Amino acid sequence: MSVSSDKARTGSCLSKKVTFKTTGPDINCAVCHCTNCRRNNGSTYTVKAWFPDKRFKFTSGEDLLKQHDDSDTNTGGIVNRWFCSHCGSPILTRSFRVPGISIVHVGLFDEAWDWRIDFEQWRKSRMSFVEDIPGVSDDCRYYDFPDKREFERVMAKL
Ligand SMILES: [Zn+2]
Ligand SMILES: [Zn+2]
């Protein structure tokens, strides 16, 4: 959850062909160290802010979106990972575990908002040089799956 208020935020992929807008505060912000997330963005971990679908809107380039149905998951469920087919930037994830929520890569936003990380998950596959994520309380650093109270907390905000 970020400190920011109801301000609208904008973002885009690298080619700026896909653009979007969010309104209001994020309802969760999480770091994931899992192998699929690392591969998804080619880096050490993903950082994604969660918005109710109704507060996330594409403003251009929706026709360029491609969806990868990631079925090689720890739950066995399918996670939809959307990306820009023009430049390859990962854009967002939608998951059966949290229906109605757009899970957006924070690196896409036009400004470096003061995101605050609520929890980090899949620390079992965390890269050796990655330190504890600052600002996360110790009981919100998960070895693998987050506790279900994290989902209950988020779903209560929908
Ligand atoms: Zn693009
Ligand atoms: Zn992950």
Image: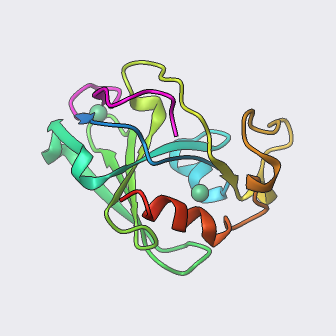
Q: Position of 58 compared to 110: left or right?
A: left
Task: Identify the residue at the far bottom of this view.
Answer: 76
Q: Position of 126 compared to 58: left or right?
A: right
Above or below for 35 versus 113? below
Residue 127, image x, y percentages: 79, 45
Task: Identify the residue at the far right of this view.
Answer: 128
Q: How many marks?
A: 0
Can residue 95 be found in the magenta stretch? no
Q: Residue at x 64, y 44 (%)?
A: 45
Q: Residue at x 25, y 45 (%)?
A: 55
Residue 67, image x, y percentages: 31, 58
Determine the quadrant in which ligand 1 lies.
top left
Q: Position of 47 compared to 78: left or right?
A: right
Q: Main secondary structure of the magenta part?
A: loop
Magenta segment boundaries in residue numbering: 1-19
Q: Nearer the viewer, residue 66 or 19?
A: 19
Q: Residue at x 77, y 49 (%)?
A: 126
Residue 22, image x, y percentages: 28, 37
